[in-house]
Amino acid sequence: MSVPFQLSDVPALSRVAVDRHEALRADAERLRARWPNARVLLLDSKGRAPVPHGDDGTAECLALRPASDYGDVPPPESIFLGESGGFDYWALADRDATGGEAVPMPGRFGAQVENVVADGELWVGLREHGADLDDAGAGLFTTALALRNWHRRARFCVKCGGATELAQFGWVSRCSSCGREEYPRTDPAVICLVHDDRGTNGEHVLLARQPQWPRGGYSVLAGFVEAGESLESCVAREVREEVGVDVRDIRYLGSQPWPFPRSIMLGFAARADSSCPLQPADGEIEDAQWFSRGRVRAAFDGDDPLRLPGNSSIARVMLRDWARA
């Protein structure tokens, strides 16, 4: 008997290999004592991180630095990421490579993005390279970028407008005027694979494209959760708003942090009647179509011009496992 498809793997950016327990970042004495032997991940001003790069290709690990290169104690702007294997891991943002050479590489839906090669290292973006990293690297890069993006948006107090300063090694923003504390924000967003109602897993999947995406790029539907709204209600509303289709049998699949700039993607599957006319939202959805399982499989094999989401996205995992069902 056929069963509803599930995610067979942990999404690329959901992998974790370090202990990020809150008590670790609150123990300043311990962190300072362990700093000389710690390892540091650098992020440049565009949020890219370095990986080893040579004639044999790009490594699956991050190019981490000895913490001692940056002083005897953690710099004020340093971010504590966690502990693993007896080592502490930190991040420092806005540390650009010097004397690097710009290198165009394939990015989202095959569009070109600019990376940098410098001193035998390739500075890559998380969106494009996250799935190529090992578990430790993917988790560290995701956390570092999420905190870096939050810091950029938490420079002033939302209560009094005063300037803020970081505390607990990057995990707390404290107002210098009124003392109000704020913690890293994560905005929930749903992402839903809608298939038709033929059999358990359907025979067709509903995909759409936004106007700014490269030609041929399609993905599953997604949108942000509104205030006072349940996740399931958000799924139904977003699908209806974006393509004019009502869904049912909404079920949860899995989640993935998506720090672009500070989201978490909550994956769902749902069923819909494929005979209902599609009504793409004006200005938001350029096109929406039902695609057969065979065509999605062909796209994964490179035998169809249909462009699917990149390897770092939970959308790709959802589509791959539906296509295999």
Image (cartoon, grey):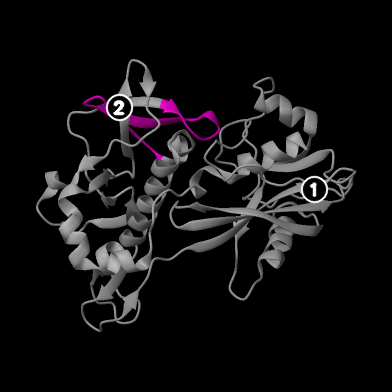
Point 67% across, 29% down: residue: 306
Q: Quadrant of residue 115?
A: top left
The residue segment tinted magenta is: 105-125
Q: How far from the left and from the top, in percent, is residue 193?
A: 71, 48
Q: Nearer the viewer, mark 1 or mark 2?
A: 1
Q: How far from the left and from the top, in percent, is residue 272?
A: 83, 52
Where residue 102 is drawn, which disc sits there? 2
Residue 155 in sight here: no
- The total number of labels drawn is 2
Mark 2 residue crowding within 10 angstroms, few (<14) / some (14–19) / many (20+): some
Front residue of 300/9: it is 9
Specify whether residue 121 is painted magenta.
yes
First in sequence: mark 1 or mark 2? Answer: 1
Question: The C terminus is located in which quarter?
Answer: top right
Q: Residue furthest left?
A: 72
Q: Is residue 133 left or right of residue 196?
A: left
Question: The N terminus is located in which quarter?
Answer: top right
Q: Is residue 200 left or right of residue 287?
A: right
Main SS, magenta region, reads strand
Point 23% across, 72% down: residue: 163
Residue 275's place in the image compared with 230, above or below, is: above
Q: Which residue is mark 1?
A: 4
Q: Quadrant of residue 206?
A: top right
Q: Residue furthest bottom?
A: 178
Specify whether residue 65 is painted magenta.
no
Front residue of 204/78: it is 78
Q: Which structural element holds mark 2?
A: strand
